[in-house]
Image: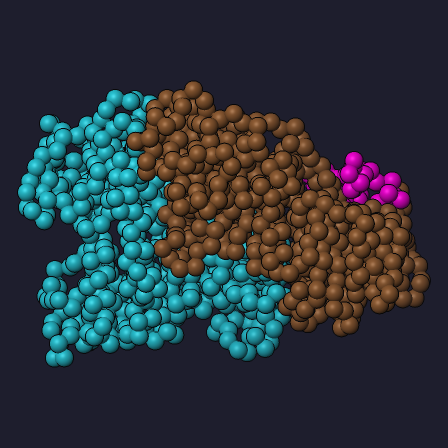
Chain colours: A cyan, B brown
Amino acid sequence: MTQTRRRILIVGGVAGGASCAARARRLCEKCDIVIFDRGPHVSFANCGLPYFVGEVIKKEEKLLVANPALFNDRFNIEVHTETEVLSIDAEQKTILVRDLNTSQERTESYDALVLSPGARAIRPPLPGIDLPGIHVLRNIPDSHRIRAALSKAKSAVIVGGGFIGLEMAENLSRRGLQLSLIEKSPQVMPPLDSEMAVPVADRLRAEGVDLRLGIGVTAFAEADNGGVRVSLDNGDSIDTDIVILAIGVQPETRLAVSAGIELGDRAGIKVDASMRTSVAGIWAVGDAVEVNDVITGELQPIPLAGPANRQGRIAASSIIGGHQDLTFRGVQATAVCGVFGLIVASTGASEKSLKRCGQKDYEKIYLHPGSHVSYFPGATPIHLKLLFSTTDGRILGAQAIGENGIARRIDTLSMAIQMGATVYDLEESELCYAPQFGAAKDPVNFAGMIAANHLRGDLPLAHWEDVEHCEANIVDVRTAGEYAQRHLPGSVNIPLEELRERLTDISPDREVWLICEVGQRAYYATRLLMQNNYQVRVLSGGMKTWDFFSRTGGSLQ
Amino acid sequence: MTQTRRRILIVGGVAGGASCAARARRLCEKCDIVIFDRGPHVSFANCGLPYFVGEVIKKEEKLLVANPALFNDRFNIEVHTETEVLSIDAEQKTILVRDLNTSQERTESYDALVLSPGARAIRPPLPGIDLPGIHVLRNIPDSHRIRAALSKAKSAVIVGGGFIGLEMAENLSRRGLQLSLIEKSPQVMPPLDSEMAVPVADRLRAEGVDLRLGIGVTAFAEADNGGVRVSLDNGDSIDTDIVILAIGVQPETRLAVSAGIELGDRAGIKVDASMRTSVAGIWAVGDAVEVNDVITGELQPIPLAGPANRQGRIAASSIIGGHQDLTFRGVQATAVCGVFGLIVASTGASEKSLKRCGQKDYEKIYLHPGSHVSYFPGATPIHLKLLFSTTDGRILGAQAIGENGIARRIDTLSMAIQMGATVYDLEESELCYAPQFGAAKDPVNFAGMIAANHLRGDLPLAHWEDVEHCEANIVDVRTAGEYAQRHLPGSVNIPLEELRERLTDISPDREVWLICEVGQRAYYATRLLMQNNYQVRVLSGGMKTWDFFSRTGGSLQ
């Protein structure tokens, strides 16, 4: 480790920048380390902002994970807040900064420069976009503006059904507002595949949110009551007290571009695995950089706090030297979101991202196990979708929704993906089990068993999106009572318990597609029929998955 | 897959046996499959029994995961309950069975025989061991006997502080009983290392359990009040209404031994990776067999439901053929237990199991992160111990205790161990994060970072058990206020924030051991001092770990 006195300047003091500064100090006691931030705070908890608006987090101080005094006292790191970095002279290795309070400008020199500028909320160029009732939520001042507006507001329109939009829906509902949520795509929660987003939409509506999917906003205007009139592309309009814009973020790259730093195709800063930019002496981390997806290889900016922190740590190690093994492996897109008691989490690729990348040799399964054994009170379903390679069984991605045990299963699967595990490994995983904490065959084991059964040829699969055009006999092996409650039109009911006696009821001339409630009885029926020389497939996830599929707005609608 | 008609007999219809039967049917529609069980039930939820006693699970039916009618109707599997298998003729491939209701005996022939006899509660040969007030809990009739006794009981003595003993303590407390728990070893929860069991003991005592560690029972006798007098090896005695014996189980091997089947050194049935015994045509699964520990290589019976289920599935696949890839990889000893709101889980090796096996090139770390970020309400500490190889960084084992998020972290670490992950992999793991669900640096990441920092030479470690005999200067870098509350005798207080200015207070001639509350500030201090040419170590886990160590009854007492 080099101990020459070096000067490390960091632009942006949240997540990646703050991590980088602290790590740099740990590796180099003698370096000068200086953080500049345009805003009034460094190292604040931006992920907590929706909950500060919702008054779950009561005090602003709670959001301040660290402050300039702590950086100075503990780490001997200089912090300049309300100080904007205006330009970079990469030749001279200097930056021009302006104190936003005094407007004084000065030049600072560096040996290493780290850009951690983050991303800014997208504000589309719509009529009325700058009306005072329209808010974004990216920092603490934003949250104060929204909190102030809430004192008089009775209603809100949230534009955007991603993570922030949904967290804001929960928190504004908590504050007693009447809510509309407008989302241009036909589903909420874009990282999920559309069928998996259906229970989230259900929950929003059950909680009284006026959810409008597949609808775009065309304009904002002042409403008669002094609020905002939101015009929609279907001709409707909504008068509301405040608007929350949550349609995503875009990398903050002005400074990088002005310094001649190369951007990627998706408008983020291009970096290597050590977080170096294209310009010598300059590193970049966090929401502003493009990173590779470990599954699909796609390069794109992904605004996640975990990777930003890792990147900060890696950049510091690269700058100081001596830790060559620390490089950024890419993002896996692991994420979790709570919305009205429902928990939604995912890791790795979605089916749509696999399709977008042209990956064809994958398969998917759906299952709906309980969060723990059914005989212990309080179990709730886990709706799980697993994507895996049909060539070698590698796990490609997973999505889970439910009220309990969601992050646990996605974390376990995230680790599996990171380590290159196959579905055969999931079969054998040994996971925590006691009646209140799981099952002897955990949902993760079940996912592995179903997928491995499929790959071994014991469980041919069919999917709901193919039902409409299929020419198979569709046999529902649930009880007559279950069948009477709801069933796929055109399906025939032969309860599993009667199947051995009623084989002659099923023509061996056509393929048989089997349905049950979640897929387990259909699997038993599959084994029975296959050994009687039928061509069989199981409709993965059974009627529970159909409940989702039939309401995606897709072909089954 | 062979489709000749074969006759598969299974002795014991719980967990492993039931799994084996159902799987055999799925693989072979034409086989005859017959289960024999000595008891009145098959496929019952033995892990739920303590909660049935505690009336958390209200109805007996809930415990019956499957019944003979379901096995017959759904799987065409014959079930004979209250039928004991008396002997095996492995030459003739027959067994002699007795109907316990009619006492009639008959011979049944097999092509494949699967032994799933389970384990029985150990009843040590103490005076009075057969008194009617002394109970074990292995099956549903046992639970009814205890429930009946509870109608008049006001107090209970639980003998044994393992999983069942602790679960019974919680459930009997729920029923309002005054409890004593007697454990011969100096700690509860034997799979944990002793320092990690301290918070469990604390919780038991806080809940009013009269916990007596390091005390053995010498005799039982009838008490004056009609209950049981429990005599202890320290001369004390306790009069109680009922006694629960929960000192462990031993493999049920009578039948196997009579058939000449080889046992292992630990008195369990010896099997290969396909669950074949030493006698052709006979397989064995579940609590009765010896399995290898995937970390230590030790062979021993391990009574866990997850592995039993996997073994049943593997034995069936081996019997039917065609699934040669399905073999048993051994056990990882992943387990979880809830006790009075505290959750305790572990996976892989403990420090004592590593020591027992003579493994020396391991290191350990302690950490105490929150279950989620501290700025979001409701976070509770996770006390985590991680064991890893010092030669290649492989994760060897983990133990975690807390009120939230415990199974999640141990499952993630279990998957990591299964896949041969190193601490460097944990540094990079991308896990679920939103404020109410974790942290941008999850406890699993932190564990990896601390261990990797150590292996890279950036964080030399010391441990509390070595403090007594160390000759280092011990410096506590917490605030003066924290130091005043409690500190290690002989330690000097230099708050982290003053350290840069007070370096001259520390002699460079002796090694410096650093303490803070959990280890983080001591790490910062370590980096600072190392770069000023001090020899430094961090006392892993800080004062929080000392709180545990100082009360293990070990040398620090």
Q: Nearer the viewer, residue B108 or A324?
A: A324
Percent across and percent down for residue A53 are 28, 64
What is the residue that sits farthest to the top in this orientation? B509
Q: Is residue B449 left or right of residue A529?
A: left
Residue B259: say if magenta. yes
Percent across and percent down for residue A523 are 59, 59
In magenta, the rendered stretch is B256-284
Q: Residue at x 70, y 66 (%)?
A: B177
Q: Is residue A168 left or right of residue B66?
A: left
What is the quadrant of residue B149 in the picture? bottom right
Percent across and percent down for residue A110 are 17, 30
Q: Nearer the viewer, residue A448 or A285?
A: A285
Q: Residue at x 72, y 49 (%)?
A: B183
Residue B300: say if magenta. no
Q: Residue at x 31, y 75 (%)?
A: A176
What is the quadrant of residue A127 in the picture? bottom left
Would residue B119 be seen by someone viewing this image from the given angle? no
Q: Residue at x 43, y 59 (%)?
A: B378
> What secondary structure is the stretch in magenta mostly built from?
loop
Q: Is residue B426 left or right of residue B51?
A: left
Would residue B159 be seen by someone viewing this image from the given angle? yes
